[in-house]
Image (cartoon, grey):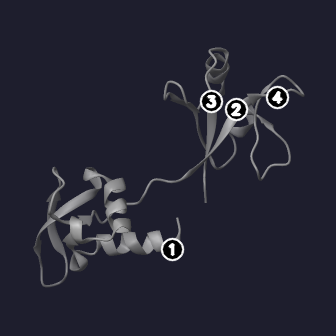
Amino acid sequence: MDKELKERIKKLKDPRKVQPYWIRSKEEQGVLFDAGIKNTLQVTKNLPDGSAHGRELSVWCDQLLILKPGYEPESEYEKCLVFVNSANGRLSVSRSNWDYARDIGDIVSEPDFYLFHDVHTGTDSHIPGHIPGWIRQGHDVHAWFVKD
């Protein structure tokens, strides 16, 4: 997560800097929108110490909005295509920071491995054994890795 996004999130959590949604910058609106209703509070009362009472937001309009104090954005992922390796016939994944393609059974032990994703059905799995069936059905499958 870049420094600007961190600063935007910090500002959007601060009840002393509350503004109606429509007045906020496009970037701030984007963060609130991406966070979604479940991670947003409508401020109903500012207290002298700068804290706020809030309630979960159920409708977007002109409310005074802040992010919930514990909100953290979802991680970003590097999505790598699973393919049949022509050198050995095995299902493999290649990443830009690797010297060679690795077998799908080996990548699940990588510390930044997140999951396998079937692009056609939207199905996710952490189990390499599911992948051959998806590939045989002609589906594109990606291995997702958490970006730093």
Marks 3 and 4, the one that precedes in the sequence? 4
Q: Mark 2 falls on what kind of element? A: strand
Name the residue type under label 1: Lys
Label of residue 85 in the image: 4
User: Closest to the observer: 72 or 36?
Assistant: 36
Residue occupied by mark 3:
141
Q: How far separated are the C-alphas under marks 2 and 4?
A: 9 Å
Label of residue 3 in the image: 1
Give me the residue at 90% from left, 28% from top: 87
Q: How far separated are the C-alphas under marks 3 and 4?
A: 14 Å
Give me the residue at 50% from left, 27% from top: 123
Q: How far separated are the C-alphas under marks 3 and 1?
A: 32 Å
Label of residue 36 in the image: none
User: Closest to the observer: 115 or 64?
Assistant: 64
Residue occupied by mark 2:
82
Q: Quarter of the image holding residue 11?
A: bottom left
Where does the image place residue 9, in percent across and percent down from the top left? 38, 69
Where does the image place residue 39, in percent across and percent down from the top left? 29, 56
Where does the image place residue 103, in percent across and percent down from the top left? 78, 33
Q: Is residue 129 above or below residue 106?
A: above
Most distant residue in the left direction: 45
2 and 3 marks in contact (CB < 8 Å): yes
Name the residue type under label 3: Val
Q: How far separated are the C-alphas under marks 1 and 2?
A: 32 Å
Q: Residues within 10 Å of mark 2 (few under 14, many from 20)?
A: many
Where does the image place residue 27, in percent across and percent down from the top left? 38, 67
